[in-house]
Image (cartoon, grey):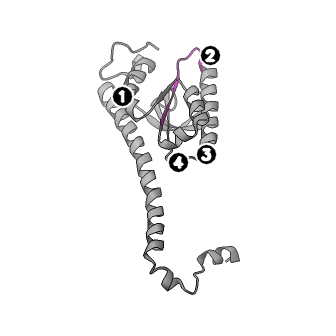
Amino acid sequence: MADFYLEQLYLPSNWPEIIKDENIIANVVRKKLTGEYTDQKGEFVERKIRSILDGIQEKYGVPHAHGQVGFLGKEVDHVLPSLEEPQVMIMVSYMETTSSNQTARANEQQAMYQKIIGENIRFGRQRVFVNVLDGAGWLARRSDLVKLYRGCDFCLNMKTLDQLEAIVCRYVPSRYFVVNPPDQVIEG
């Protein structure tokens, strides 16, 4: 085993005294739990969106998926009605704190949006890109937040998720509404 890895396993000679220090242990546990708590909040946003999309599927019969969208060459968080015929593509980003990953994410999603616009123009389509953003980290990185806001057709947060149903009803072709078609569904 490499010395570098062995050094990471090394315990100082006074480790029994160190672990008795309640402040040190409390800080280690707090740091571990903070990461897990942040992950759970991000997962809460994802579950909320899935719940809304499941409700749309139950109400209208419009399916949704998660995965690689061919013409984008990227994995998309939520796609309606299918990966093969994406009409509404939803990307979710929850950031509690700031990081350089936010700039990379904003740039990546802007490139995705540009591909969608190009496809729409080239093939006469009306595909839409939805960004769902939440978390204080986005407020602290305004330039990245603005880039994400401008780089989509709709930008939602937890308080505006109820708009997803109207977006789906407007942009998913009528043939996918097999249960209960709403009046405003486009033909296609």
Q: Earlier in the sequence, mark 3 or mark 2?
A: 3
| Residue tagged 3 | 101
Q: Earlier in the sequence, mark 4 or mark 2?
A: 4
- Element at label 2: helix
Residue 86: in magenta span? no
| Residue tagged 4 | 97
**173, above or below 164, in the image:** above
Q: Viewer-nearest of labels 4 and 1?
A: 4
- x and y, in percent, of residue 131 in the image: 50, 32
- Give the Cα separation between the discs numbered 1 and 3: 28 Å
- x and y, in percent, of residue 112 in the image: 61, 31
The image quadrant where one finds the N terminus is bottom right
Instruction: Identify the residue at horizontal 43%, vertical 69% (top origin).
Output: 26
Instruction: Identify the residue at horizontal 39%, vertical 29% (top origin).
Output: 160
- x and y, in percent, of residue 101 in the image: 61, 45
Q: Mark 4: few, some, or many residues within 10 Å (few <14, many ≥20)?
A: some
- x and y, in percent, of residue 129 in the image: 52, 27
- Name the mark on residue 121: 2
Which quadrant of the view contains residue 182? top left
- Give the Cα separation between the discs numbered 2 and 1: 28 Å
The kind of residue on which mark 2 rests is Ile
Q: Earlier in the sequence, mark 4 or mark 1?
A: 4
Instruction: Identify the residue at horizontal 42%, vertical 33% (top origin).
Output: 64
Q: Mark 3: few, some, or many residues within 10 Å (few <14, many ≥20)?
A: few
- Residue range highlighted in magenta: 120-133
| Residue 2 in sight from this viewpoint | no
- Give the Cα separation between the discs numbered 4 and 2: 37 Å
Q: Viewer-nearest of labels 4 and 2?
A: 4
**180, above or below 143, in the image:** above
- Give the Cα separation between the discs numbered 4 and 3: 11 Å
The kind of residue on which mark 3 rests is Asn
Spot the residue most to the right. 3
